[in-house]
Amino acid sequence: MAVVYQKSKGLTDKELHYCPGCNHGIVHKLVAESLEELGLLDDAIGVCPVGCSVFAYNYFSCDMQEAAHGRAPAVATGIKRTHPTQPVFTYQGDGDLASIGAAEIVHAAMRGEKFTTIFINNAIYGMTGGQMAPTTLIGQKATTCPLGRTKEQAGMPIRVSELLSTLDGCVYAERVCVTDIPNLNKAKKAIKKAFQLQMEGKGFTFVEVLSTCPTNWGMTPLKSIEWLKENMIPYYPLGVIKDTSAEVN
Amino acid sequence: MEKELWKGNEAIAEAAIRAGCDCFFGYPITPQSEVPEYLSLHMPQHGKTFVQAESEVAAINMVYGAAGSGMRAMTSSSSPGVSLKQEGITYLAGAELPAVIVNCMRGGPGLGTIQPAQGDYFQATRGGGNGDYRTVVLAPSNIQEAVDFVQEAFDIADQYRNPVVVLADGLIGQMMEPIEWHDVPKRKLPAKDWATTGRKGRDHHNIINSLYIDPNECDDFNAHLAKKYQLIKENEVRWDTKDTDDAELLITAYGTPARIVLTALEQLRAAGVKAGLFRPISLWPFPEKPLHDLAGQSHIKAILDVEMSIDGQMIDDVRLGVEGQKPISYLGHAGGVIPTVDEMVEAGKKALKEAE
């Protein structure tokens, strides 16, 4: 019988713990497939965050490290600097990366660390139960802004891809989502490109994936997809935010 | 072997290179900045990695990543910076990663002062981060010991898969002394088959992690750590003594004050006071039993603990070791003021008199 589809070798058989409708599973699959298709699985070392994807070390079949909250870019720096020929990636959520780990991601990008960061932006803290993130939208309700986020109280949400794009060391930043097949294909292409550029030694590469959190948004998975399209994409525009890879040797 | 004149911090840095340190991640802070300065030039010359991190927090997490992927990794700092590293140190202990952390202690609390002090004893020996863990703590009293301990610290860390702290102070870091370079005793070290080096054909993936979400698993893991710490207690206790055979006054001190005590002993003996020194070298595991046995000797009448700390921190361990067998007095300064020989002589005489 012809095999038309099979699970990536980049994933283990461990059952995912993610909520129904959560995008983590899809993004895991895309990262795993990208590593496999590029022939990088056997060399790759991944770093997972604290947050919903804290158990990602059980799901990716390559060697994995679990970092302290927000510190994945520093941990990845320690790995990549001592294993310069091997693919290294961090997989981080928005609380981890954009809040407590803001210094680590900015400086890793500034130094042009040659690893890839997959950044899951779902505009909320998932694992701890729906608190406001730096990416939470104005008016969006969360358990620590029950009346909705206000600019006066919490400032405007942070656009991490744009922020990192101001740094020379960051050679590639793209924002994608996985709400439908065309977007999913674009996301896969972006992740693959980021790993390719990393292996060419170009510099820091970054893929931001807008993601749903039906559980903490208090919506059905389908409604979540609509909400993401209507609310997140206007504030966090999709597409290549920066690509200077052609200019870098 | 010829003696060479070295500044403490630079000697510590050179010792790391000689110990086969693969990578150093640091951040500037007085009085230890010569360590990263020296290594920023010399590590690349040896084909090794040097990164100046954006913070102490990042530096210790770079150590975590490198150590987790099988490298000999080190960071150094001074008191306020070591406070920032505590998160990383508990994660290193929790993930059972070998690493060397040098603390050139200065005065505190808070920003304190840049002069030498010993106020980080509790932080170093009690585990400054969260959870039930221990770090091996070695306290050099001169630059020769500092370089020897740094070299051995890498082996101890690898042997037990545990972070090791070399607890020096600003005086050890900033002074110059003649030293000899010699090999430290070799240990049989386990292979790092747990490291995340990339699978490279391995039939399973390695995971570096300190998360045990199931409480029973977390309990089991803590029991495993406790067993390891027990083994370290059995194997790694170190101390030194001077003139204790007939001593009536026993002075306890470590690091910089201990070297000043040596002069105080001479003056006390010249004045007819039989004084001796008990110097813990491993602060954890603390030499509890040797101190207990010595304090139990009938010729010991009184004990004087001397530290660069206002009320004493090691004195708690001294009390646990002595177990009330003899009276214990204290002499100390904090904030960068170093106890003098005269103060020690006076406090020693007073301690003996009160004991009578």
Image (cartoon, rainbow, N blue to C red):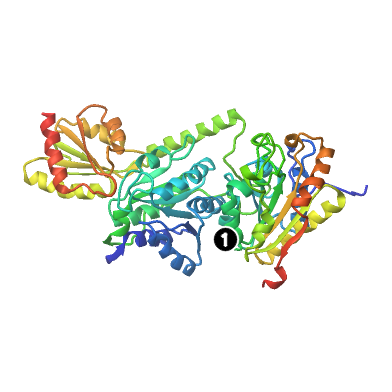
Residue A87 quadrant: bottom right
Which residue in the protein does label 1 denote? Answer: A81
Front residue of B245 and A31: A31
Q: Secondary structure at mark 1?
A: helix
Mark 1 residue type: Arg
Left or right placement of residue B111 versus residue A86 in this view = left
Image quadrant where residue A248 sits: bottom right
For the question of whether residue B156 can be seen, the reply is no
Q: Quadrant of the C terminus of chain B?
A: top left
Label 1 resides on the chain identified as A
Q: Nearer the viewer, residue A119 or B261?
A: A119
| Viewer can see residue A186 | yes
Mark 1 neighbour class, 10 Å CA radius: few under 14, some 14 to 19, many 20 or more: many
- Residue A199 in the image, given as x and y percentages of width and height: 69, 64
Q: Left or right: where does residue A188 sit relative to residue A170?
A: right
Query: In the rendering, at what x and y percent does residue A32 appear?
Result: 75, 51
Residue A18 location (% of width, % of height) = 74, 37
Residue displayed at 26% across by 32% down: B292
Horizontal arrangement in the rendering, residue A110 relative to residue A142 (left or right)? left
Extreme residue in the right direction:
A1
Above or below B274: residue B143: below
- The residue drawn where x is 39% and y is 52% is B78
Q: Is residue B137 above or below residue A191?
A: above
Report the residue at 40% width, 56% height from top: B29
Quadrant of the rendering where the N terminus of chain B is positioned: bottom left
Where in the figure is residue A208, as x and y percent of width and height? 72, 53
